[in-house]
Amino acid sequence: MNPVVNLDDYIKALPKTELHVHIEGTLEPELIFELAQRNNVSLPYASVQALREAYAFTNLQSFLDLYYAGASVLITEQDFYDMTMAYLQRAHADGVCHAEIMFDPQTHTERGIAIETVFSGIARAVRDMQARTGLTSYLLMSFLRHLSEEAAFETLNAALPLREAYGDIWVGIGLDSSELGNPPEKFARVFERCRELGFRLVAHAGEEGPAHYVRDALDVLHAERIDHGVRSADDPALVQRLIEEQIPLTVCPLSNLKLCVVDDLAKHNLADFLRQGVLVTINADDPAYFGGYVADNYLAVAKALKLSRNELAQLADNSIIASFLPIGRKAALRARVRAIAQ
Ligand code: ADE
Ligand code: ZN
């Protein structure tokens, strides 16, 4: 590609996957207001602007409180469709070729929404988008770790009958929500069951929690990919293991900044990880809340950490390697990255 092309265009031209995005975290304030009106849900904010202004977080929990409140406007299958389609259109514009999307059924079933409604709306948008543009998506059904393991089992059992209808895109299981005080071991049995059932496994670890949560996510949960994992840096032997075993980290720079995991993007350890050989990837996490979608995250770290264009291409390549795509599709996408990077 012509080297004079601007950085933003270069980033968008790189074929990428997005591996760490919570669909409920893509609900923009405008859509929250629209759905609230459509569903007669009253919001404690006078305007879109007032809601946006409330997005000043001090830690993960301060964000999660608003995130769960925002999701309360999702009632019908069409609501889940509209949210997912809006995200997929943004991702497509950013050059995302494949997304692995987390969703939290418990956020909705606890409010009396049927789990079928959640799966159906999300999956219909995924299929429509694939038919229209070729952008593929997989779904990672995630358990809320502030709830009990028993509740996770109930969710799994409620979802399993849907596997026949959605098994082509519902490929994996995740673990998210409040990390501190909710260690991986709490979900050892349900993850074991999911492994027996043949699901791919990911887990949030080492976002706010200590490095040993990352070890436990690997050894106790058998997670194949770690969501965030930035606190692994506190344990050099663990970093060595991540490099040797090429365990992917799905890092979310703007999320880390907004949730005060780092106080300055220029101090983010993503570039160190990349240069040491850790299989790091860049993702948006909850883009509607953290001020940017995936290309914004690439651009922000490119500037703050002075990443070269080759390093940006390496990050796009890592995102393909770390995905759950079949090897043939990975090879085709990686060839496109190489063609752009030279
Ligand atoms: N759920 C949505 N975003 C999350 C994050 N960054 N960490 C943990 N759980 C989440
Ligand atoms: Zn996350």
Image: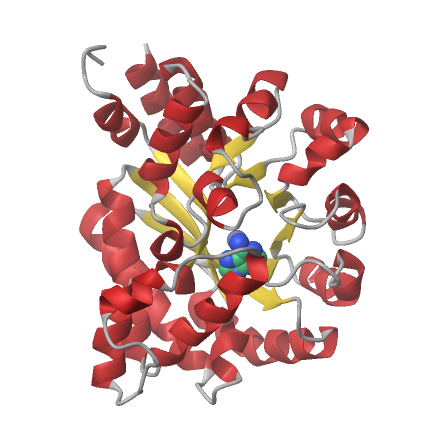
Residue 234 at least partly seen: yes
Looking at the image, residue 96 sits to the left or right of residue 252; the answer is left
What residue is at 34 percent from the left and 48 percent from the top? 291
Looking at the image, residue 154 sits to the left or right of residue 41; the answer is right
Position in image of residue 139 (x %, y %): 46, 58
**Is 98 in front, or is 9?**
9
Q: Quadrant of the N terminus?
A: top left
- Quadrant hosting residue 114: bottom left
What residue is at 37 percent from the left and 24 percent from the top? 303
What residue is at 24 percent from the left and 74 percent from the top? 33
- Quadrant hosting residue 40: bottom left
What residue is at 33 percent from the left and 45 percent from the top? 293
Looking at the image, residue 267 sits to the left or right of residue 4; the answer is right
Above or below — where is 90 with respect to 51? Answer: above
- Label count reads 0
Q: Quadrant of the C terminus?
A: top left
**Is 246 in front, or is 70?**
70
